[in-house]
Image: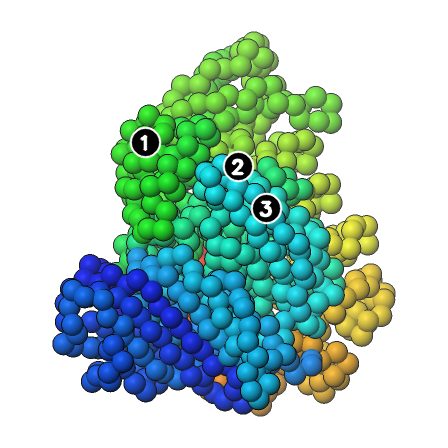
Amino acid sequence: MYVLTREDARQRSASIKVRHIDVSLDLSGATRESHFPVCSHMTLVTATPDLFIDCAGIVQQVSVNGIAVPYTHDGERIDLHELPTDQEITISVDAQCRYSTTGEGLHRYRDPEDGRYYLYTQFEPEDAHRAWPCFDQPDIKPQWTFHVIAPSFWVVTSNGVATTTDLEESNTRWDFSTTPPLSSYITAVVAGQWAIVDGGTWEGSAGDGASACLDLRLMCRQALAEAMDSDDILAVTRAGLDHYHAHYGYTYPWGSYDQIFVPEYNLGAMENPGCVTFTESYLSRDTPSFALRQKRANTILHEMCHMWFGDLVTPAWWDNLWLKESFAENQGTTTAAEATVYTGEWASFAIGRKAWAYAQDQYPTTHPIVADIPDIPAATNNFDGITYAKGASVLKQLVAWVGEDAFYQGVRLYFQRHANGATSLDDLLTALEEASGYDLASWKDAWLLTTGPSKLSVRTTSDEDGKVTSLTLLQEGLARPHCLNISYWTSRGDALQCISKDRVRIEGRDLLLSVPEEFSVPGGADMLQLIVVNDDDLTYAIGTLDERSTQTALSRVSRIEETITRAVIWSHLFAAVREGELDPRRYIDAALTHMTAEKEDAIFERLLATIAQSRTFLPGHVRGEYDSKILQAIAQAMRATSLDRSRSLLHLFVDVWSAGADTSYSDSLVALARGEEGELLPLIAGEESAWVVRCALAARGLVDEKQLDAWLDESPTGENKTRWVRARSSIPNASIREAVWKEVLSLELSNHHLSASLQGLNASSWEGKEYTDHFFAELSSFWERASMGLGLRYINAGFPMNLDSDRPDEAEHLLALTRQWLTDNESAAAALARLVTEKLDDCERAFARQKQWQ
Ligand SMILES: [Zn+2]
């Protein structure tokens, strides 16, 4: 199958200028047919007589200026020859494209609860041509006009603003206004029986002479309409529009602002101008928790930033994906922290997203922020911890380095210069250099073109009187320029008090720091109980705590008032666990001790996640002991905290319980699954919680398929159907497992049901070990047969990660199979090999840690 390469894309955009694409879709048969008719009229000038057009449908006719012409089509790419050159022509392609169930192209979902249909497009990086013929690369930015025929009781939205005309046979035609120049990957159509919340209008201007008056609409499935907490979503939306207009100097140009929460989404959200799509898991029938709302606010503001970074000014190719993603991640967090009630967002970033970046950056597959992306599969892989979280962190460092005013001045210059265009790295750096007066060439080399996190620590010396005589900041790994804060703490009664916080710049291996007066007196060294490197999280580097600071942190971190400081400390501690420098048991003990006192929900959530991860670094026999302790602590905490937190605690409880052999809570969990108060556990209301428990019981064989069916019948919602798929797949029963495995390989499962099936198979207490062998035996063939989206799910949900150094034969078998697969498949797609290499690295790390902490 043809794969679009950077070279082909470069040659094509160099030889054509596409002015306009007019797309007509007929979705009137959406409830009956497998395909929909579509026609694209592309108006362009080409300098060469040979040209290819991307189209993954069944091509029926290609014409040039209304006259049918010969063509070849390999399923992805239409090749045309002998085109008239250097004059405006219109190429029209009639095709039939397929409704998708993989979340790529035009996804179609039938809600099992009420039979209603919901359709939406998802294209990044290159799936627009699954829905309509086009030039599917980011630096070709024509204007677009969409026309959609759909059943009259449907709602349709797209990038433009619609007018409607009633047609015969109960259909309506929706004609959308022509867009400003737009890359194919952010064109969009959303159609179906969506519920709509009219959020009123937003009016404003960025002071550039233009003004915007936007209808704010929210949409979701009818079945979820009551779960739409529109007040919060709209408040964040309005705050974001105000904030970006105050900083960007360029008025929002896209005419409307629809936000649609869609089912079976492959990612968090997508920045289609005026037609932003989000995963509907940001809504919850059980009332979303504060932590979830905070995450959603960040995503809303991330996507909104893209209206400028990405949509208005677009990276010319996927090497510079960071030019939009790192900015959106940085700006989404900044805006949430500064302009909404979610003020803890930078703390959340420091403890959560940064860990994603550090982990990704320590894989053998790591890459510079500005990456080498030869083709589309490589692009798909790069929506990762480097492009998002490391990039955003490096931008935070840049703001610290050049100052916030200069940063935004550079950004405004960049928009003015490149609006509606496609850019590369130098375009941005030139604007930032002009605005800041800094030469950013060496900054670029050090931060954007290198890999791996540096490590920062402080070495302390003292004399025999106990005076601190020197403090030295040390940089290991790559020596980069950092501007950072270092804080020094001492005990005051129960609390920890910050004696001094200093801003320093380091460019080389070490830097002598000034010793705060309080510590340069006799006995001062004893007073210095905690040194926090990178306090406020200004830079990107793994910070190391010395043993004294580690002890202080483990015992007293929740006594620190500043949220960001606590987040940074936990981040340092968990990095040490990953590195094998801190015993996971010490970490888990501290996390269990401090979690109830932790005020910031995002930190609380992260502590639960890292407890779960730290467990995997312990060998089975040690983990067993620890699990009982963890279960006890969580059960206790669940009784004494908010509903939000008890739900999260229940998740962790069930995770730990499922993985272990502790049976003391089984009866209580069976009660919870039935919706009753358990003897040892409080009832946590809500279907999601009930199904979390049901899945765990199924995985341990404590409920059967019939019981699961009965629960689903009680409330046959789309969300519950997916939970049922997962629970059923995990039942330790040979014939069920065989049937599920067949379904997985059939490629007929939707994206979400595929993941749920694989997660279930993986989570089961089934003793047979054939799953691991099956997984590897089918890996290459699955990847080749399936779409990229399903291939990613096969690996991420299906890779068998449960290894235990107490069962060395099994663990070695998994490692050997993985290594063998990599050796045998040297010619496998680079994207696939990269994912398997990363999984191997995760397994090797866990195995090494388990052997270390016997
Ligand atoms: Zn993004």
Determine which residue is flagged by label 3.
203
Task: Give percent across and percent down for residue 824.
Answer: 28, 74
User: Which residue is painted at 44% across and 23% down in the image?
Assistant: 504
Q: Amino acid at mark 3?
A: Glu
Q: CA distance from mark 1 to mark 3?
A: 33 Å
Tell me whether circle 1 and circle 3 mark residues in contact (CB < 8 Å). no
Task: Give percent across and percent down for residue 520.
Answer: 53, 11
User: Which residue is painted at 41% across and 45% down in the image?
Assistant: 391
User: Which residue is painted at 73% across and 23% down in the image?
Assistant: 493
Task: Give percent across and percent down for residue 275.
Answer: 52, 61
Left or right: 202 with respect to 715?
left
Nearer-N-terminus badge (2/3): 3
| Residue 821 vertical placement versus 584 (above, below) | below
User: Which quadrant would residue 24 be assigned to in this image?
Assistant: bottom left
In which quadrant of the rendered image does the C terminus lie? Answer: bottom right
Q: Amino acid at mark 1?
A: Glu
User: Which quadrant would residue 539 be assigned to in this image?
Assistant: top left
User: Which residue is painted at 70% across and 73% down in the image?
Assistant: 223
Determine which residue is flagged by label 1.
433
Tell me whether circle 2 and circle 3 mark residues in contact (CB < 8 Å). no
Q: Amino acid at mark 2?
A: Ala
Q: Is mark 1 within 8 Å of ligand 1?
A: no
Nearer-N-terminus badge (1/3): 3
Determine which residue is flagged by label 2.
246
Residue density around tag 3, few if under 14, some if 14–19, many if 20 or more, within 10 Å: few
Question: Helix or strand or loop: what does disc 2 sit on?
Answer: helix
